Amino acid sequence: MRLRTRPRRAAGRGIHDEGFNETFAKPGRNSQRHSNGALGPAIETYLWKGTFVLSFRFKLALVFTATLVMAVTLVTWGVTSNTRAKFELLDQSRSNALIDQFRKEFAQRGDEVVNRVSGIAETNETTKMAIDLSRPQGDASKYVYDADGLAPQQKLDFLDLVGDDGSLISSFEYKARFGYKTDWVTAPGVDWNNEGAFLQRIELPDGVALSLTAVHVVTVGDKKLYVIGGVQLGKGFLTTLVLPTGMRALFYKNLQPVFDPGSLADVNGPLPLADRLSSLIEQVRKTGAAAEETIQWNADPASAENFHADPLFGREKQLLGVLLVGSSRKELVSLLDFIRTLGVLVGGAGILLGGLIGLWVSARVSRPIARLATGARQVAAGDWGVRVDVRSRDEVGRLARDFNEMTRQLAEQRDRLVQAERVAAWREIARRLAHELKNPLFPLQLTLENLQRARTQTPEQFDEIFEESTATLRAELNNLKTIVARFSDFSKMPAPQLQSVNLNEAVRSSVRLYDAQFNLAGRPPISPELYLDESLPLIQADPDLLHRALGNLVLNSLDAMPSGGTLTIRTAKNNGTVAVEISDTGAGLTPEECERLFTPYYTTKRHGTGLGLAIVQSVVSDHHGKISVESAPGAGATFRIELPVRPPEAEAIHEITHESSGENGESGYTGVEAKKEETKPVAAPRRELASVTKSTLGLGN
Amino acid sequence: MRERVNSMDPRSTGLSEADGYANERLLELVFERLVRLDDTGKPAPGLATSWEHDASQTHWQFQIRPGVKFHDGTSLTPALVAAAMKEDMSGTWQVSASDRGIAIELPYPQPGLLVDLATRDLFIFHRAQDTVFGTGPFRIAEWQAQKRLVLVASEDYWAGRPFIDRLEISLGVAPQQQLVDLELGRAEVVEVLPNLTRRASQSAVRVEASAPVELYSLMVTPRGAKSYDSQFSKALSLAIDRAAIVNVLLQRQGEPAGSLLPQWLSGYAFLFPTAPNLEQAKKIRTLFSSSPLLALDYDGSDPMAATLAQRIAVDARQAGIVMSVSAAPATDGPNHADVHLVGRHFTAPDADQALQAFLVDVVTEQAAGDHAGEARTQGAMIALDTPERRYAAERDAIDGGRIIPIVFVPEIYALGPSVRDWMPPRWGGWRLEDVWLDAAPHAAATGGG
């Protein structure tokens, strides 16, 4: 007998040992690997207990890429926000500059109007008119058309000549109003000749107009002649403004009680879609303060314009006009589009590059961990001598060194444990052998001593004693042979040769073998009762081993009922497995007995070897089945075997078993595959044995 | 001239009131009528040397002047006269030629036929090779529609060759420019609008004005008549300060008009008040709960009409009557005005004829072409033979609220220093065949002979 470990067997069963994969390969049926081909094995997911799990390397690459994308996004957002803010600032600055320019132009134009009106007031015609009208009999009617000649001289759009009493003498723009009062100009307290130009609402025959007006007074004696002249404010005025590219100026003449789209014009005339600016203008009309609004003229964001509205007041602080400075957002939108596009391109390239770099970096970072994982899996597979080669000095390196130390210590402990178990096993064997051999040897010794004493007897007596002694010797020698045969059988457990087997037939065959035992003379009869499910599928099993296991259980049950009873056998199928229950009505077992029932060489019978149930468990284990026992003192015992219809690793088991029990004559219970877990109670009084692996303890012949 | 005359064909149609009057002035230089008016306004022989009619005044016989030749040399014959008359007349007249003259058969008595023949566009002409020839003192030497007309003296004119050899008449010249041309010696005779009379009088030119021969009045359109009744028209009439219009806008060239005929023509115009009464106008205005915008239009080609219309609107607003003022559409089409401002010339010094013609126009305007209007027209034509009837007719027309007289305006001309014997009739006109030029001041003037 010798112990053999086979650490690389697991790798030979189709599980490669690269990276983390092996960590998850161990769950076998419960794990499934998925690979996303583009990035190869780096981007892998695993179906672990119903959940997709990303590989650590992929996660690392994902985090790296996400970080890069976030960085690019943040940079893009930051650049966009900053650009927008700067553009808004620039736009505000340009608008203010244009409004300042408008005010300067307004003031300059006002000075021009003042000069022109003064020019008219200082002409000989006006002077003569003033002198004539200062006379008591001065006739104003003859001057009704004089404004027609004076206004064009000074390029004035509006010119009113008003008499001392405020009556209109002549009007260039509305001569039909002659004789009507123009009281505002005669109001006391105003030094018109030193007053600048101002905005004024001018009434025309066909409507109203906005004028930049100045007044000059010609005084003759105590009579005054008021010369009121002005130029129209409108699109013509806007043409004098120097507009930067992308900007335009609009002028709204606030001469109607409600918003009038026709009063809004730019240098090209009335503005189409003027209603779109109604809210902005209404806001200025309501508050009398500057306002701002962005108007998008159509679905294209580049059509948007930011408008700054600046109110213009008349002498009485009445709102007469609104200057609107429009700044196109086209450049901003184009710039932002470019930035966004660049961001997307850079982001895309960053994702690609980041992914690749992330994969490379994550591979470097995760490689030690992968090695650790491989080592851990190898350790789990039984290769305790594995060493992880990690040269880094960081935490991973320290972990690897600890891992190596751990495996070294585990290997040492395992060796010590194996050695201790070997000693214990040999002691147990020695004890069992001594116990088994002691019983036949004592009668042999007594018989031989009787034979020696019989030499002093008479020949007849000697012959009689001799016959009796030889019979006894023969019987005890048979006992010894039986004991030896049982040990031999246990050591010769063959590998299962799987084929289609009818479990019910195996049961019937096993029961028939013991027909004679049911009605043995000198013992109360035992009645067999079979409840077999005839719909059981054929299973893949070794018929001989199965027959042997079932026979052992039947025999075990017969031995448990020395006073007679009922042997009940049931078969059933259940979701890919078949089960057979063998029950007796014997004395039953204590929990402690159940605990050790399948331990080799443990027996509750006077002449048992303790190998019967161990053989049964070994057979069930080789078929990837389960065996359990349910019993209580005085209540009999029920053994239950569950076997897969087709063992999933039957071929592997076959291969392993074949190798293990090969030509070198070594035991099949070696290495990792030979590990047999210690039988442990699951729930008293039922004992269930998970016989997935075999014991590490191997017994040779 | 400021008007742009389109044609020198006597049968040209579609002229506006102003263009028609100007066209008639030009045609009178080239073409003649059977009858003319003498200086007192009485019918006098023209191309017809004598005439007679029956007792019913429905059958008229005219003797044609012998020895008269058209400008192409064709002799004037009764047949040619009858042909021209037939082309002139409406279908209600029947014209026939005889050896010595023509006969006109009328469907109804018409005592004023002679004035009609002397004032209406019943010119005698002769067509040859698509050219129209007249018998007037001048013949056409060059014609550019709307721009220029050049006339030369007709050597064979039956009343004697005119003094002026050649006349060049420019069309479509702005009033201001006309005055400038006159001042610069580029013209001898120009029209003067009232607003320019002060300037003209300040220059070294003579200003000659006729009697007030043009009435500016408001004519309520059928559309307006649906919304405004006679009371509303009265309120509007009371709101208008006619004296201010005459004194200021017309520079005292004209008379306030409360009647349809001026005082010099009717003799009773003073019975129609012209003074404004704003309080009364406001009082009447309050009878109307609401006053929608009253649309007033005017002849856009008349420079004075715009100012007058605007002043009327200004005055009306004082009485709470809001009017929108606009020029009438230049082309024929739907007119959405409630009130027209119309300037109408009196072409004859005969009150009966003038009023009849005026009322016909009024009735025609109001009837808008329906057949009932024609009947009323005929009724009006036979009932205005006495001042009392004319007064009553005017009173009815004005009180009916369909017409609101505003002002009477004269024809005003400025004459260059070389113009002699400018003696137009009191009711307007040129009589250029009697004018001669003193060669000394402006021998090289364009209009010089």
Image (spheres, rainbow, N blue to C red):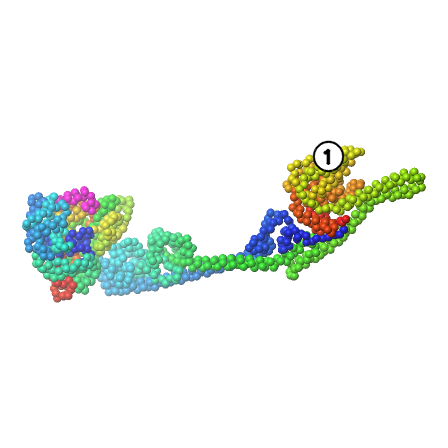
The picture quadrant where one finds residue A135 is bottom left
Seen from the viewer's position, the closer of residues A9 and A82 is: A9
User: A174 left or right of A645?
Assistant: left
Q: How many dots with numbers?
A: 1
Magenta highlight on residue B378 = yes
- At horizontal 73% and vertical 55% (from top left) the residue drawn is A412
Q: Position of residue B358 (x, y in %)?
A: 17, 48
Q: Position of residue B414 (x, y in %)?
A: 16, 60
Seen from the viewer's position, the closer of residues B292 and A221 is: B292
The answer to whether residue B228 is above or below residue B186 is: above
SS assignment at label 1: strand
Q: Position of residue A545 (x, y in %)?
A: 71, 43
Seen from the viewer's position, the closer of residues A220 and A106 is: A106
Q: Which residues are magenta?
A: B363-384
**Chain name for mark 1:** A
Q: Position of residue A170 (x, y in %)?
A: 25, 58
- At horizontal 64% and vertical 49% (from top left) the residue drawn is A27
- At horizontal 91% and vertical 43% (from top left) the residue drawn is A452
Answer yes or no: is residue B281 visible.
no
Q: Main secondary structure of the magenta part?
A: helix
Magenta highlight on residue A601 = no
Q: Which residue is mark 1?
A: A528
User: A610 left or right of B9?
Assistant: right
- At horizontal 37% and vertical 59% (from top left) the residue drawn is A249
The answer to whether residue B76 is above or below residue A508 is: below
Identity, as a three-letter code, of the amino acid under mark 1 = Pro
